[in-house]
Image (cartoon, rainbow, N blue to C red):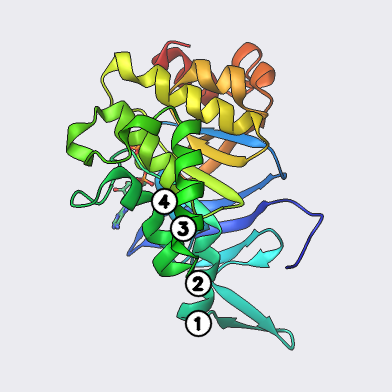
Amino acid sequence: MRISSGPMLKAENVHKSYGKTKVLKGISLEVQKGEVMCLLGPSGSGKSTFLRCINHLETINQGRIYVDGNLVGARLHKGRLYEQKEKEICLLRREIGMVFQHFNLFPHMTVLQNLIEGPVFVKKEDKDSAIDRARKLLDKVGLGKWESSYPKQLSGGQQQRVAIARSLAMDPKLMLFDEPTSALDPELVGEVLAVMKDLAGSGMTMVVVTHEIGFAKGVAHKVVLMDKGVVVETGTPGDIFDNPENERTRSFLANVGS
Ligand SMILES: Nc1ncnc2c1ncn2[C@@H]1O[C@H](COP(=O)(O)OP(=O)(O)OP(=O)(O)O)[C@@H](O)[C@H]1O
Ligand SMILES: [Mg+2]
């Protein structure tokens, strides 16, 4: 395994367009290992698109993205860039967990089966050890008793915690969250944020798109404000929430009522 000392995520001048619509217009940022970055910004500013570019669900038009020192979607050979092969892209994706607003659990599988599916069938792990690890992860997210249930028998908050555990079962080095609590009833938000806070405390590198300002204030090391496809402002939670420099940051925060 390659061990690199640089940032876990580095984006350099990332551009992405859909037809004539320019969605990302030169995003540059860095997330160090063990760091939690919260990505904020108005609807349509390109947050989800940027997350999808990180694990190459979208191909960027310009710029470069590195995950743990490895170029995403491209391979450098003798000074020239070549498109990565499907196999290389799959290897990259295994290392990046992604949790969406809608949990996307496999509805016909039990909670435990949801967790072992990736490790056993994608990573070819031994089934017994995958089950062992899955149970530990379920305990960690407070769902040890639910391993034989089906997703539809669980609340939204519980399903999202299963989705997080399922991502962790692949042993990722980077976790991406796209508004993981915005589809939940308000009383279920806290339990999911608590699991994410624990995960951050355990040293996981995380990029979290969220409107939960309290979470960003309490857990993020770095906060990035995006608007209209550009990074408007980057700083510590203290910088961004207590002393925002940019007018667009101020008006965004006034609108979300932080
Ligand atoms: N597949 C696509 N084809 C065309 N346009 C797209 C596509 N995906 C996103 N867009 C456009 O890109 C822009 C940014 O979308 P994106 O979903 O990244 O924003 P966002 O910041 O995540 O917004 P929200 O807070 O509403 O989730 C929007 O104008 C959207 O319509
Ligand atoms: Mg989005």
Cβ atoms under marks 1 and 2 closer than 8 Å: yes
The one nearer the camera, 226 or 173, is 173
Residue at x 58%, y 67% (from the top left corner): 72
- Inspect the image, locate mark 1, and give the three-letter code of the amino acid beneath it: Lys
Residues packed near mark 3 inside 10 Å, few (<14), some (14 to 19) or many (20 plus): few
Cβ atoms under marks 3 and 1 closer than 8 Å: no
The one nearer the camera, 166 or 53, is 166
Residue at x 53%, y 79% (from the top left corner): 84
Residues packed near mark 2 inside 10 Å, few (<14), some (14 to 19) or many (20 plus): some
- Per the rendering, the mark at residue 49 is 4
> Which residue bears the numbered disc 1?
85
- Per the rendering, the mark at residue 128 is 3
Question: Does label 3 or label 2 sit earlier along the sequence?
Answer: 2
- Residue 45 visible, this angle: no
Residue 207 % position (x, y): 55, 40
Residues packed near mark 4 inside 10 Å, few (<14), some (14 to 19) or many (20 plus): some
Question: Does label 1 or label 4 sit earlier along the sequence?
Answer: 4
Q: Nearer the viewer, mark 3 or mark 1?
A: 3
Quadrant location, the N terminus: bottom right
- Inspect the image, locate mark 4, and give the three-letter code of the amino acid beneath it: Thr
> Which residue bears the numbered disc 2?
89
Classify mark 2: helix, strand or loop. Answer: helix
Estimate the spatial distance between the alpha carbons at disc 1 and disc 4, rounded to whole Å: 22 Å
